[in-house]
Image (spheres, helix red, strand yellow):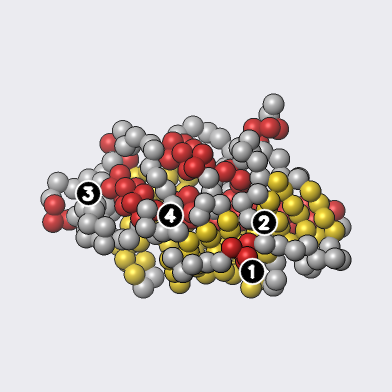
Amino acid sequence: MITKILKTLLIFCILFSVILFLPVFLFSQDKSNTDENTNQNISTTNDDNAEANSLNIKIVSVNDVKKLMSEKFKTISDYTANFEWINGDAHYKGKIEYKKPDKILLEFEEPKDQKIVSDGKILYIYLPSLKVVVTQTLSEGTESEILTTQSEKGLYKLFNEYAFSFYDKSTLQKFNDTMAYHLKLFQKQPKVGFKKMDIWVSKEGLILQSNGVSPNGLNVSLTFSNIKLNTEVPDYIFDFEIPADAQVIRNIIVPFSEKQR
């Protein structure tokens, strides 16, 4: 029973970490300097290749895409979207709702009724099949990738620890039924987490898909669809009441930095 719980929690922690890349990129105020490596600043000298968007930002270099994502942040207070996550052979899907600055709700269709929710102070992971609720207090001192990617500190960390470049072309490409930019990210220094990723960003600055390889070698893919912005998501949906018959496990998600101290 304990082994099953821990295995399930590990999967959910990875999922939570990956999903929180969406608010990090989507709601970003880019504090990083422009990428200095010429391979991470691919540009075209012909202005005709610069793509138009509603924010009137011409996309010439990868830093323009980052700027586009950053500027989009200023117009958004909340969002909802459907997500589909593939982790090796495992397949999950559901709905995500996010409200600035730090409230998030993930409701799963598969596996049925599983849930991740945070009101910004406490994170809950609900596993109804096991009748288990994991709670984690979210403090300012928490430095793990899982818990900081939704914060300003986590945002700063992401833009500083990853180098951005175009995956192949610096222009919009076909992605499903829309057009998007294809970017790749590499860790600047080896650390825990994804060593490299690639993401698809819409011409309006929204992440549509992120892909990577987990530390244990599994291919991970997270796709977002039906994204709706500024729908006045209510606060009460981020309140979670622990079921009376659930076993509660508290504060087992330990920051990597604290493990090393």
Marked residue nearer the N-terminal end (4 or 3): 4
10 Å neighbourhood of mark 1: few (<14), some, or many (≥20)?
some
> Residue at image x 38%, y 42%?
30
| Residue under numbered circle 1 | 108
10 Å neighbourhood of mark 4: few (<14), some, or many (≥20)?
many
| Residue under numbered circle 2 | 12
Q: Is residue 123 in view?
A: yes
Camera-near label (4 vs 2) is 4
Q: Residue furthest top?
A: 261
| Residue under numbered circle 3 | 60
Give the quadrant of the N terminus.
Answer: bottom right
Q: What is the x, y in percent for residue 89?
A: 63, 63
Give the quarter of the image for residue 174.
Answer: bottom left
Give the quadrant of the C terminus.
Answer: top right
10 Å neighbourhood of mark 3: few (<14), some, or many (≥20)?
many
Q: Amino acid at mark 4?
A: Leu
Marked residue nearer the N-terminal end (2 or 1): 2
Q: What is the x, y in percent for residue 33?
A: 34, 34
> Residue at image x 71%, y 62%?
240
Marked residue nearer the N-terminal end (3 or 1): 3
| Residue under numbered circle 4 | 26
> Residue at image x 34%, y 70%?
178
Q: Amino acid at mark 2?
A: Phe
Residue 227 versus residue 199: which sits nearer the camera?
Answer: 227
Left or right of residue 2, residue 22 in this image: left
Q: Amino acid at mark 3?
A: Val
Residue 58 versus residue 196: which sits nearer the camera?
Answer: 58
Give the structural element (helix, strand or loop) at label 4.
Answer: helix
Marked residue nearer the N-terminal end (1 or 4): 4
> Residue at image x 39%, y 38%?
31
Q: Is residue 224 in view?
A: no
Give the structural element (helix, strand or loop) at label 2.
Answer: helix
